Amino acid sequence: MTKTTALWTLTILVSLSCGATAGEHANRSGHSADLTFVARMEASPQAPAAAPQWKSREEYDAFNAMATEKDPNKKISLAEAFLQKYPTSDFKSGAYVTEMQVYFQLNKSDQAVDAARKVLGVDPDNLEALAFLSYVFPFTFKADDPDATAKLSRAESDARHGLDVLQKFQKPAGATDEQFKAYVNPKRALFNSAIGFVDLQRKDYADSITALKAADTDNPSDVYAFYRLGLAYIYSTPPDYDHAIWYIARAVSLAQAAKNPAGDDINTFLKRAYVNYHGNDQGLADILTQTAASVNPPDGFKVEAMKVPEKTGDANKDAYNEMTFPLKLGGEKAQKTWDALKGQPLGLAGFVDSVVKSPDAADTYLVRIDIMDASKSQPGTWDIEVKDTTQPKVTNLSPGDPVRFKGTLSAYTATPSLVLSVDGTIDPDTIPDEPKAKAKPKPKPTTPHKTTPPSN
């Protein structure tokens, strides 16, 4: 084949090999591109002296069979067969890219990542593989992984290398500015988003904000980048609730518009954070409406902090409010307040939200207790978490049971809602000797059998 024919054929085959898998990836990540243009772009701006060539008609036919196969499992088998039969093929990376995409289509993320690594082993500057690794990393990373630090470093290295490769790209002859932008911007957004995620895990919130804002500029429709940007603001010291609420609300608006199921969890977090800071949910609906139409908050946008809680006449609620109000606002005053509270004894009464086993110690239970009405009315939200190491019978407690506790204040979390952690015990008089018997399900009503009268 001539050089021109080979390049033309490669453009078609890469487009075919991407197929529905590439389309699905575009839908999931909110990015799109003309696949023919993508194929042209994958020829690096610093093109090698010798263009890729088919070495035989059989090699071409084998690759074409793989590229046009519709069944994903058969496509994988054909890719493996191609790689085994043609280990020195100029199109080896294309076969690995196909495997990467198909494994992702099959929700086999580990195999997809392995395939992406193989692509980079053949073609270290392959933007499809680099972008895929940056896209998938935040969804597969586990903070408790023994190799978490090394994996974060590798993810950052992949993303920064992707940015370097993009920086060297030059617009191909015949491509429009819009085509070039449509190819470059989504990938640059993915790389910056991955860097922002890594910084977020490292608690380097300032750098995380910088990277995620760059990502959101290139892709103003990425639910997860906006959500993480909001997290970076809310976890900063002091927390920036104005920007945090705006960007998390933006993530909710985008998720709802796209019918992304992640929107429900993000919205729950948003409501808890907003009420924790503002005192109630008034005004939140208006913010969601604004964020649906605007990427960034308008000048002067502010979330009003809650006012000093008034006395309720309930000693438990008033004591909790007095302790926690300064902590909710963050900043230097919150730190001074906590310095004075930490290690102090605390004893209050409330209602059980839940009892769970501690992930850190086999014989420790976490008894989560509602003090305030807002927490009591919302399962899964609590005000106190008692770390109990001596009372296994706390598992007999049920949601809504009244309890008293005492112990020592050990820690607190301010977001999305404030929770005080206490090392202590539950008053034995409030712990049942036996768990509540589960209500038996009501028997299903039976339809009486119709009887046929005897014939005469």
Image (cartoon, rainbow, N blue to C red):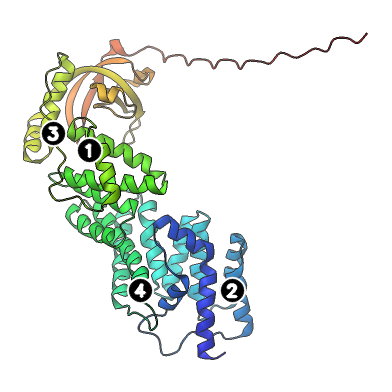
User: Height in image: 14 above or below 334?
Assistant: below
Which of discs 4 and 3 lies nearer the camera? The answer is 4
* Snapshot quadrant of residue 41: bottom left
User: Height in image: 53 above or below 400?
Assistant: below
**Residue 376 picture location, percent across and down:** 29, 22
Q: Return the disc, 2 or 4, that comes first in the chain's sequence.
A: 2
User: Height in image: 134 above or below 428?
Assistant: below
Residue bearing mark 1 = 415
Spatial CA distance of label 2 from label 4 is 32 Å
**Residue 83 picture location, percent across and down:** 56, 73
Spatial CA distance of label 2 from label 1 is 52 Å
Kind of residue indicated by mark 1: Thr
Q: Which mark is residue 327?
A: 3
Does residue 405 appear in this view? yes
* Snapshot quadrant of residue 448: top right
Spatial CA distance of label 3 from label 2 is 62 Å
Q: Return the disc, 3 or 1, that comes first in the chain's sequence.
A: 3
Q: Secondary structure at mark 2?
A: helix
Q: Nearer the viewer, residue 420 or 222?
A: 222
